[in-house]
Each structure stands twice: as C-alpha cells, then as structure tokens.
Image: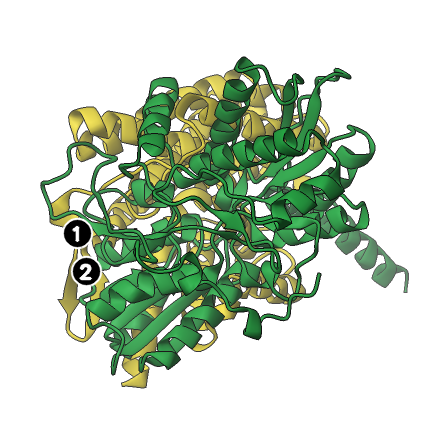
Chain colours: A green, B yellow
C-alpha cells in the first residue's frame, strides 16, 4: 500500500515538476493576447474619442493602418482649430479580442469619459463593442467591420457602420465574376474563415452563387490562425472546381494566395475579401483573381489624390483602405459635431439619421441609411496587372470602375430593407 | 481514388512535420540540456525570417537562407551568455518568465523596426509550381525544404551520436554532476546547444517565410505547435521529437481531409491522448533531475 502511495507521489511530482512546467510553457506560448497599453492624456477641454482596433493577431497589420489614418485626420482637424474650437483627443488601443474589446470599451466610457467610441476591424469585436455602446447609450462608429449580421439582426440605434457589408463585397466582386463567365454553370469550391465575419461572407456568397446559377461543390471552415494551407490545397485539387472562391480574412488570404501560387493549381481563383495590405503582403507574382475593395489609393478623385499624396509624404508608403476609412470616419464625425454643435449622442444620431451627405473622397458622396445605419458608398473590384507592368511593389494591383456604376443608385448592391431583420 | 487522396495528405503531412521539426528539435535540446523552457524560441524563428528577407533582397535567396542562421546563431551566443546562463540552477519559473518577456520584447522590437504590416517574401521563381510523382502532387519548394530538413537533421544526429561533443551533451542531459566530476565544463557545450537550437529555428523562419508571410507575431504563432511537438515527442529523445513532428503533420493533414474545421484542434487532441497514456511523451527518456 505504502509503495503504491509512493508511486503516486512520484508520478504526481513528476507531472508537477519540470514536465508540468513544459506544459505551462505551452499554455503561455498560446497566450498571444497581451495588447498594447493605452496612452492617456487627460485634458478637460478636449473631446475624447475612444478608438479600438486590433493591433496584434491576424488583423493586426490592418489595425496599424487604421491608427495611421485616424492620426492623420486628428492632426489635420486639430491643426485647423479642432471641432467647435476644441481639440480632438483620440485614444487608440489594441482591441485584442471580443472580450477585451468589450471591457476596454466599458472602461473608456466609465473611466476615461470618451464622447464617442469608434474603430474595429474584427466583426466579432465590433459586435461586443456595439452591445456596450447600446447599454451605455453611447455612439459607436463601427468603422471597419463588415459582417452582415451587425447591420441586420444585431443592429442597434447607437451603432453606425462605415465599411461596406459583406453582401456588397460579394456583389461587387460577383459582378466582375459574372462578366468573366466564372459563375453560371460552374463548379465552385470555397474556404471560409471560421468566425462571425467568415460565416456571414459565406452565406452571402452562397446566396449570390445560387441566384446566378453557380454550383457550390464545397465550402470548408478554416481556423483564423491557420498559416499552412497545403492540406486544403490538396482537397481543392481533388474536387477539381472551376472556381475557387475564398471567404477568408486577414493573414489567411495572403497565406492562401501565396501557397496557391506555390502549388501552381490551375483553377480560377477569386474571393470576396482582400484588403490592399494583404494583397501587398502576398506580393506580385503570388496574387491572381478578382477581389472587391471599399477604396484604393489609385482612385483619381481630387480628394483621394490629395489624401494619398499626404499619406505617402507622412509614412513613405501608400495608404491602405483601412487608413482611408478611419480618416474619413473621423472627418464624418467631426462634420456631425460641427453641424449639430454638440457631442451629444442623441443629436449626433439624429444628424446621421437625417441622411446627411459626407465627402468620402470618392466620386459620389455617401450617407447613412436611416433604417440600418449603413453608409451608402461606391465599391471597386480589382485584379492583378499583367506581369512586368508594376512600377514598384505597391503597384501590381489593377482597380476597376466604381460599382454601382455612376448612372445606378448607390443602394443597388446593398442588402434590401424587405429582407432585413434590423429593428432599432 | 479516395485512398490515393488520403495517402497524398499523409505524405504532405510528413513534409509539414519536417518543418515543425526545425523548431521543435532546438526547443527540446535546450530544455533537455539546460532545463530551460525557451519561450523566446519563436522570436529567433521570426528574426531569422526577417534577416533572411533583408539579406535575400540584397544578395539573393540562397544567401539569405545561409546567412540568417549564422546571424541568429551569434545572437544565440549573447542570449546564452548574458541571460540563460543565470537561470540554469534558479527556480525554473524565473527562466520561464524571462524568456516569455524576451519573446514579447522581441515581437515589439520587430514591429518597431519593420512595421506591423506583413512583408512579402518570395521564393525564387524556379521553385514555384508543382512536381508530379506518380499520382502525387508536390510543391517543388516544399520538396526542396524537405531535402534541407533531412540534411540538417542527419547532421545534427551525427553530431549528437557520433562525436565526442555529442557524448558530452548526452551525458550532460542525464548526469551533469558526473560530467563535472570528470573535469568537463558544461557551459561551452550549453552555449553551442543554444546556438544550434536558435540557428535551426532561424533556418525554419528563413525557409518558411516564402511560403507564408513574414510578420511580427509569426514567432508566437509557431511556438504553440513547436511545444505540442516537444510534449508529444518526449524529452531527451532525438527520435521522439522527429516522430512527434511527423505525426502532428500527418494527423493534421488527415483530419483536414475528413473534417477540415477540426484541423487545428487535431494536434491538441493528439497531445491529450499521448499524455494520457504516456505522460513522458512518446519516446521521452526518464531524466532523473527533472523527476
């Protein structure tokens, strides 16, 4: 009996000893959730804005552009005398994940006394922040989150959505795919990012393919931290589709297209989500296919040209769409505060809901739809320039004409009211 | 046909396992000899990728892959002499905290030096595309990668098992006190082990950069898998780590074949099962001073 006890003790000690330590190490290694500390500058006069974006993790690279964009807008607004004579104080912090995002939002409201919350790229984090905003009756400008659910069943009257929803992304790239004859009667295989945004994108894509005579022969979920896609590439090869349509996000897209080029699979490729930064990271020669974007740095409007030039001067590289969207979002907010002469949530909501027009540095102005708080604006499909035409490493993307076309209504590609379950 | 597809996933998994091996073996060596869980191992992998990218842009891909492990190996000397050395006999939790802290500092330093945006790292065009061996499709680049892993692992095995250096190291794993009694200072050996460990990690980063993207958090990402491999393989066993790395690669591939959504979870399930039945890992040796 004593022997058995000793044996137990020995085993227990072994497990709790260095081997246990190794396991603790493994657990710690998995802990990549430590974010940036925020920088606080308390001054009573300033208008404080709480800004949350992912600065680490699979969307972190996009978040860096977000911060660059909003800083640029802040500096311009403050240099021009601020809003109603008050300087803007934008506190940018890493939102890390939906749980941390929600507790940071709560803290920004309670302790830092922000007037407005804005930011986000991750749809799941945008959802938790929007719930905090609604509970505290505080305005939240959801800048870069694209999930349909946010403006549909999860909508609330305190949240406004600047970026295009996934339905628009699917329709924008989809129109180009239809023109290329890649949908009707074709066998389509999809890979989908396994979180809120990806699921939404997959739903919208399936709807689009079904409506246009495409046959979905496969759709696999892919965890957001996947970096090696080789087993999925082999599955695609087995399925022999006509078109590979991806619903991936962030670094996933870059890794996927790179490895797709590496394996040299012959099937046409397209996708409904690719940010310019992800495309640049893939690099020339690795990217192919048709993709949608909400804005691009080669847009030839006076506003976009001036913004792009100023950004390049400041950072030595062209702005990514998240830099642009944060920049215009803060300008939109400043316009609303100036017009209403207030930072009051109710007054700002009323102003946005009046469908006031905002300059988005695009050919047409945009406005928030009053019933789902979605900004109506143009989008653009893009593809890749033929080999050898790129001037530099930023220049290999070829952007198409704005959709909806100039003679079509802005709402053409957006989700329709009749199908929406949004109730404010 | 179904069977061929499955076999293709198995073979592809072996290739991927080879790459995991580059990271896990160094981690296992440093732990076995020094008793230190090097949570900063991934940082050396990331730095390796960045150095290879910088060198590669100037001197070509091959130079990048060769020079990067050397540069990181030199960093490894400083790492061992200035930092790790102080913790061999200290409470293990201290080395855990120090290396964890170093990993975060390194990640942030990379972010400050190169920016958070991922960098594009390209393989030479002649490596792009696939090779068909019978029914099997291989990425040409990954076949090259497998060859490199095979050469590096053979060299390491020979070093550890056929040289006097290796005999001292292996003796040091089991009985450092006896090695000391024989009048051999283990410290220079430990430096060499750390250099070997971080240099192979850097080689992994340099080789895998062109397949994925080079970004600041790449070290943190890979560490989880590397740890799983080490835990499954067991400590102090060269072949244990080799077996575990290949097994993790294959299990992931086969899981994705049948249930893609469970692909990433599969290796944790595998670790769970192995630890249930073999708490010491598949081929882990009983190392007295760790018991």
Residue in view at x 70 percent, y 19 percent: A46
Describe the element under mark 2 as helix, strand or loop: loop
Kindly identify the residue that appears in the image at 75 percent across and 15 percent down. A43
Q: Chain of mark 2?
A: A
- Residue wearing tag 1: B128
Q: Position of residue A35 (x, y in %)?
A: 63, 34
Give percent across and percent down for residue A64.
48, 33
Asked if residue A56 is positioned above or below residue B145 in the image, the reply reads above
**Quarter of the image that includes the N terminus of chain A:** bottom right
Provide the secondary structure element on which disc 1 rests: loop
Answer left or right for A175 relative to B100: left
Q: Judge whether residue B247 can be spotted in this image.
A: no
Instruction: Name the residue carrying label 2.
Output: A264
Q: Are marks 2 and 1 in contact (CB under 8 Å)?
A: yes
Percent position (x, y) of residue A162? 53, 47
* Dot 2 crowding, Cα within 10 Å, few <14, some 14–19, many 20+: some
Q: Residues within 10 Å of mark 1 (few under 14, many from 20)?
A: some
Q: Is residue A64 visible?
A: yes
Residue B6 appears left or right of B39: left
Q: Nearer the viewer, residue A357 or A273?
A: A357
């Amino acid at each position: 009996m004593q022997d058995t006890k000793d044996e137990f003790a020995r085993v227990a000690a072994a497990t709790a000893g260095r081997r246990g330590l190794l396991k603790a190490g493994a657990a710690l290694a998995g802990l990549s959730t430590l974010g940036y500390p925020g920088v606080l500058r308390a001054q009573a006069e300033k208008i404080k804005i709480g800004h949350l974006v992912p600065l680490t993790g699979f969307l972190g690279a996009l978040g860096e552009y977000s911060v660059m964009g909003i800083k640029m807008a802040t500096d311009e607004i403050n240099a021009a005398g601020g809003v109603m004579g008050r300087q803007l104080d934008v506190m940018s912090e890493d939102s890390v994940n939906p749980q941390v995002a929600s507790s940071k939002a709560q803290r920004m409201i309670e302790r830092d006394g922000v007037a407005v919350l804005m930011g986000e790229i991750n749809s799941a984090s945008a959802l938790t922040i929007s719930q905090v905003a609604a509970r505290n009756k505080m305005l939240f400008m959801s800048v870069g989150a694209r999930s349909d659910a946010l403006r549909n069943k999860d909508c609330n009257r305190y949240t406004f959505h600047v970026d295009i929803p996934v339905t628009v992304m699917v329709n924008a790239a989809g129109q180009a795919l239809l023109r290329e004859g890649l949908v009707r009667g074709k066998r389509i295989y999809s890979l989908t990012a396994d979180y809120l945004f990806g699921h939404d994108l997959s739903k919208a894509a399936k709807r689009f393919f079904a409506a246009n005579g495409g046959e979905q022969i496969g759709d696999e979920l892919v965890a957001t931290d996947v970096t090696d896609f080789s087993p999925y590439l082999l599955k695609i090869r087995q399925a022999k589709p006509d078109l590979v349509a991806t619903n991936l996000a962030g670094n996933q897209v870059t890794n996927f297209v790179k490895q797709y080029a590496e394996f040299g699979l012959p099937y046409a490729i397209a996708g409904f989500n690719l940010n310019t930064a992800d495309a640049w990271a893939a690099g020339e020669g690795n990217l192919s296919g048709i993709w949608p974007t909400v804005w691009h740095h080669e847009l030839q409007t006076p506003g976009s040209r001036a913004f792009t030039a100023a950004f390049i001067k400041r950072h030595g590289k062209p702005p990514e769409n998240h830099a642009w969207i944060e920049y215009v979002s803060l300008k939109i907010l400043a316009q609303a505060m100036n017009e209403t002469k207030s930072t009051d949530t109710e007054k700002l909501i009323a102003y946005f809901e009046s469908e006031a027009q905002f300059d988005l540095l695009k050919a047409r102005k945009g406005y928030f739809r009053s019933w789902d708080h979605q900004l109506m604006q143009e989008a653009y499909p893009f593809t890749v320039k033929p080999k050898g035409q790129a001037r530099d490493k930023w220049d290999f993307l070829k952007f198409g004409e704005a959709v909806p076309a100039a003679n079509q209504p802005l709402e053409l590609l957006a989700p329709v009211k009749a199908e929406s379950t949004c109730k404010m | 046909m179904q069977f061929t597809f499955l076999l293709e996933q198995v073979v592809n998994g072996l290739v991927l396992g080879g790459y995991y091996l580059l990271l896990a073996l160094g981690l296992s060596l440093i732990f076995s000899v020094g008793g230190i869980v090097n949570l900063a191992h991934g940082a050396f992998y990331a730095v390796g990728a960045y150095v290879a990218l910088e060198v590669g842009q100037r001197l070509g891909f091959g130079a990048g892959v060769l020079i990067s492990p050397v540069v990181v190996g030199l960093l490894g000397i400083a790492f061992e002499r200035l930092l790790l050395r102080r913790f061999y006999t200290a409470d293990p939790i201290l080395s855990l905290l120090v290396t964890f802290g170093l990993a975060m500092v390194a990640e942030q330093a990379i972010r400050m030096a190169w920016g958070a945006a991922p960098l594009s790292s390209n393989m030479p065009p002649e490596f792009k595309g696939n090779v068909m061996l019978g029914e099997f499709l291989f990425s040409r680049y990954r076949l090259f990668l497998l060859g490199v892993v095979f050469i590096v692992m053979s060299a390491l095995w020979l070093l550890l098992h056929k040289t006097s250096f290796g005999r001292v190291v292996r003796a040091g794993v089991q009985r450092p006190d006896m090695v000391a009694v024989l009048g051999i200072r283990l410290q220079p050996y430990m430096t060499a082990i750390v250099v070997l460990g971080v240099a192979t990690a850097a080689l992994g980063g340099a080789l895998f950069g062109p397949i994925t993207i080079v970004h600041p958090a790449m070290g943190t990402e890979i560490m989880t898998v590397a740890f799983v491999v080490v835990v499954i393989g067991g400590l102090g066993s060269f072949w244990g780590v080799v077996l575990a790395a290949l097994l993790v690669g294959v299990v992931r591939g086969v899981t994705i074949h049948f249930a893609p959504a469970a692909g990433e979870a599969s290796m944790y399930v595998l670790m769970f099962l192995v630890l249930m039945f073999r708490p010491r890992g598949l081929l882990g040796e009983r190392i007295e001073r760790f018991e």
